[in-house]
Amino acid sequence: MKNLQAFSLTLEHQVLWVRAQGTWHGRTALDYIQAFRELVLPITARPWAVVLDIRHWQLCPVEVFTLLKDNTRWCFEHNLRHVETICADNAIVMWQFLKATDITAPANLVSRVATDDAAARLSLQAAGFLDD
């Protein structure tokens, strides 16, 4: 598990659990992307999933959007097949999230909104990414 103040990343089977917190700047986004790719690269030979928990993410400068869009593109190129998003209860943060991930998704990508960790886990178990 890799923990930094602005994010935490945990790899479980073929699933990367991401928790974003606070306001990110360019350096934070670059650190996140590096840690993200280091953790997930060993599992990219097979389809994998990500849970994006953005309930505690805050507004970020626009420079972060470009970096995160590039990471989203990288994920699609490296076998990402399932996304569970645990949404923020903030319309502006949700708009920011949409801008930061505004990339044309592959046709075989499943993208769902989960209410919490338990709902995301059930969906990923049903999809075969996590054991029961």
Image (cartoon, helix red, strand yellow):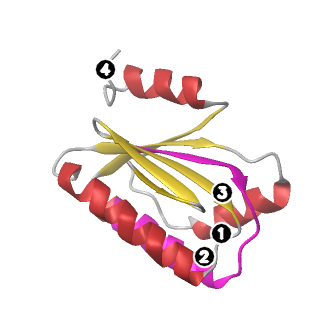
- Of tags 1 and 4, which is closer to the observer? 4
Location of residue 6 (image quadrant): bottom right
Tell which of 120 and 25 is nearer to you.
25
Give residue 9's position: percent from left, percent from top. Answer: 44, 51
For disc 3, the neighbor class at 10 Å (few under 14, some 14 to 19, many from 20) is: some
Three-letter amino acid code at disc 1? Answer: Lys
Q: Is residue 94 left or right of residue 118?
A: right
Q: Residue at x 50, y 52 (%)?
A: 8
Q: Nearer the viewer, mark 3 or mark 1?
A: 3
Residue at mark 4: 131
Disc 3 marks a residue whose amino acid type is Gln
Looking at the rendered structure, the secondary structure element under dot 1 is: helix
Q: Nearer the viewer, residue 103 or 92?
A: 92
Please tell me which residue is depicted at 56% across the width and 23% down the height of the picture: 118
Mark 2 Cα within 10 Å, few/some/many (few <14, many 20+)?
many
Q: Residue furthest top?
A: 132
Disc 3 and disc 1 in contact, CB within 8 angstroms = no
Q: Are marks 2 and 1 in contact (CB under 8 Å)?
A: yes
If you read the primary sequence from the N terminus, does the residue marked by circle 2 or circle 4 appear first? 2
**Sequence-first disc among 2 and 3:** 3
| CA separation in Å, label 2 and label 4 | 33 Å
Please give the residue where the numbered disc 2 appears in the rendered image.
65
Q: Earlier in the sequence, mark 2 or mark 1?
A: 2
Q: Is residue 58 one of those drawn in magenta?
A: yes
Q: Amino acid at mark 2?
A: Phe
Q: Nearer the viewer, mark 2 or mark 1?
A: 2
Residue 17 lies, with reference to residue 101, above or below; the image says: above
Q: Secondary structure at mark 4?
A: loop
Mark 1, residue position:
99
Q: Which residues are magenta?
A: 50-75
